[in-house]
Image: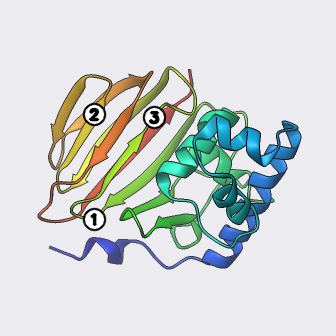
Amino acid sequence: MREIDAALPASAPDKVEAGLASRLADLREQHAWSLEELARRTGVSRSTLSRMERAQISPTATMLGKLCAVYGRTMSQLLAEVESEQPQLVRADVQQIWRDEASGFTRRSVSPPQSGFRGEVVEGILRPGSDIAYDQPPIPGLEQHIWVLEGTVRITTGDHVYDLATGDCLRFRLRGRSRFYCPGPAAVRYVLLIVLP
């Protein structure tokens, strides 16, 4: 079996991180929120938010999930806003990749970044032992389809727990907490289809 991490080419993290930091600062200013107010709304400390907005640190998947929730965006929408153009076609070698090394999560935006569309496709990879929890969805009622390409993953939505293996597909509407856990022994690679309500 091939190395899963080899499936994702390297990206330009400096450009993505700088653009993300700038976009996060812009969103806070658009809402006329102080760092203290955003910290209150997200549960992320003021100093951490400040360092993220200055591109001194990268947000974890959990932190980015909290920010997306308060700004009413999916993670793909937020990352697409970092892009200056909205192409119809994005070749595999230039698809945007975001890595959260701390949690062991790699996310590839497969769909061309376009505003106004309701669906998007994302490829996710979780290392063995990776455990990512989200307190709330970025948009309540978000429809998600998770199709496992390789490995196993445990998905928790609300009070429901699903163990998925290669080839399995789970569909649900996200209304509350969720959790993605890779029990191993190998990494899991999956396709996530997101449909806005």
- Residue 61 in view (yes/no): yes
Q: Is 31 situated left or right of 160 in this image?
A: right
Where residue 121 sits: x, y (%)? Answer: 48, 45
What residue occupies the far left of the structure in this picture?
A: 185
Mark positioned earlier in the residue sequence (3 or 2) = 3
Where residue 148 sits: x, y (%)? Answer: 25, 48
Secondary element at tag 3: loop
Mark positioned earlier in the residue sequence (3 or 1) = 1
Quadrant for residue 128, please give it.
Answer: bottom left
Residue 115 versus residue 186 in the image, above or below: above
| Residue hosting label 2 | 156
Q: Is 146 situated left or right of 86 in this image?
A: left
Q: Which is more foreground, mark 3 or mark 1? A: 3
Which residue corresponds to the image point at 74% horizontal and 58% vertical from the top-left?
82
Mark 3 nearby-residue class (10 Å; few <14, some 14–19, many ≥20):
some
- What's the residue type where badge 2 is placed? Thr
Mark 2 nearby-residue class (10 Å; few <14, some 14–19, many ≥20):
some
- What's the residue type where badge 3 is placed? Asp
Front residue of 14/69: it is: 69
Quadrant for residue 162, please give it.
Answer: top left
Q: Are marks 3 and 1 in contact (CB under 8 Å)?
A: no
Q: Which mark is residue 127?
A: 1
Q: Quadrant of the C terminus?
A: top right
Separation of residues labelled 3 and 2 (CA atoms): 12 Å
| Residue hosting label 3 | 135
Where residue 91 sits: x, y (%)? Answer: 57, 66
Which residue corresponds to the image point at 72% horizontal and 41% vertical from the top-left?
38
Mark positioned earlier in the residue sequence (1 or 2) = 1
Separation of residues labelled 3 and 1 (CA atoms): 21 Å
Q: Which is more foreground, mark 3 or mark 2? A: 3
